[in-house]
Amino acid sequence: MSQQLLLFAEPLLREGLARLLREPPHHYRVATAPTDLEGPPQLVLWHPETSIEPSSLWREAHQLSDHWQPAPLLIVLPGGVRLSRDQLLALPAAGLIENPDHLALLEAITTLLAGGRVVDLQGTVSAAPSPPASPTLGMGQLLLISGLQQIDRDLQACRALLEDASSQLLLVLVLEGRLRELNAARTLLLWLWGPVSLAWGELPEPSATTLSTLDTAANRSSPGGADRGGGPDRSGGADRARPPTQITLARRTAEGTWTAIQQRLRERIETGLVNRSGQLMAMEGLHRERRSDLLLALLDQLELLRLRLGADQPLPAELRHHWLALQPELREQALRRMASPYVRLPQEGQLRPVAETLLRNSNLSISDPELPDPHPMLAALVLGQPLLVDGQLLAPDEPLAVLQLERLVCNWLLRNAEQVSAQVLGSCAAWPELRRYLLVPDLLATRNLERLRNQLNAQQRWNDWFERPVALYESRRLLLELQQGAILLAPCTEPRDQELRQLSFGQQLVTLALETRDAVAPQLQSLIKGLGNVLVVVLTQVLGRAIGLIGRGILQGMGRSVSRS
């Protein structure tokens, strides 16, 4: 017997959809009203009106989902819905597709009936909102806004030139260096004026592009503008650009979630990556094929480790211990696969196995301190436990949970690849024949390779002594993401008090300086404001009156002289 669907749509659209669903080869039984049902439906399909309000969309989706459980809800969105991506993903629907063709619609229905989940949202361009009345800005706010605007213009110009100069190596190196300088200037500007401006009033947002760093941080702390009660934001979140989102889960389980994440990351890795993080990365020194091999090897090793943990069935409290104990072995296996265990290269007149020599000269037991706690990711992907996302416990198959898990897996992948790549660069410095096999052609020269290693070491020392204490004190963590063929930095806010207490004395001095600055800033502002008021009084009431009396005396003297003559 064919499966039964319940369809809600406008009259004209409803007839067309019903005719499509009843045609072969599916032959679905379509009920266009609850009274036409013959038993409970296997799927509820809702096509809201184009002019529906965001609040009505949110309310109707919750009512349909609650009333027709356990039947999955498929929402076919029209174009122009005024909701952001995170607000749409928070809707209680197993399927969420926007402006699909008939093949995509039928495929989504098939996936949902098989127990899966489908999300296919089109990207939108941010609309230009009407300029609000700008409040009075303080000096810190003006410096921050004007500086970010200038840096943003220079970044766009450099990126445009970089796209046109792909064949000119020298120009590409100069532009990439300029991009790193501008990103460092942005970071310094935000550090200097961002926290101080909080004491001087709320910082207005001049544009979504100019304050992209601040906007990203705000989105991480409150995705989509949704309040904690779960309702949609009425402040016009649709004015911002909505990136395209495609998520397909064959099964709504931890296994199905991991399969979807693995497939999405594999596709991004195979298309090639460009470093847009603003930081120098050791992975940039690897040959493009070796870089992809390393990332794919780490992804496959993560799959094997996940299966191993699932087979051992450790207690939730022991999951972190097992994970950390197996990390060095995982990196070793990934390095062995990237270098190929069968390749031999000459070294000092003898053929030596590349993989074993690299493993012997590398230290892969040290973990990156910027990696977050792995327990939430492992509990969701191994044990199928809910994941805490922005104050809400979500099942691992929920779209927002899938994106958060993908973000955590991607950060783990890139940071481990960076650690392995740094060890490979160190081995290549002592093995010149290895450079042709593993590194980009620019690093064949000893000077270029040593320059890159020195820059990486200097960046690491700067991060350890300054940037990391600042990030810990501000409860901020930078996650590495893969977006549209580029490696990006995504800030997120999470408590890091335990790591803060483990800092050395020199690092704690940095946090003490920040705390002193935050404590002194309001008093300094009040002092400057008071001195300014005193200066105004002196200039207007004292000097102004004195100058007025002098001028009046001069005029009176001139008048007497004229009358006498």
Image (tube, grey):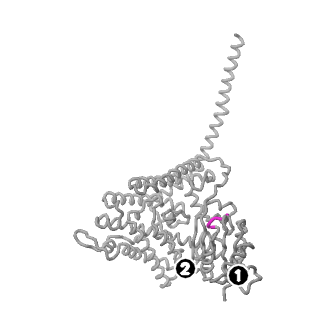
Quarter of the image containing the N terminus?
A: bottom right
**Residue at which label 2 appears:** 256
Mark closer to the observer (1, 2): 1
Q: Give the tally of numbered discs.
A: 2
Left or right, 183 with reference to 286: right
- Residue 234 sits in quarter: bottom right
The answer to which of 122 and 324 lies nearer the viewer is: 122
Image: 166 above or below 379: above
Left or right, 532 with reference to 159: right
| Circle 2 Cα neighbour tier, 10 Å, few/some/many (<14 / 14–19 / ≥20) | some
In the rendered image, residue 514, in percent from the top left (x then y), is placed at 52, 55
Whether 83 is among the magenta residues is: yes
Quarter of the image containing the C terminus?
A: top right
Which numbered dot is residue 30?
Answer: 1
Q: State how far apart marks 1 and 2 are (Cα).
A: 29 Å
Disc 1 secondary structure class: strand
Q: Which residues are magenta?
A: 82-86
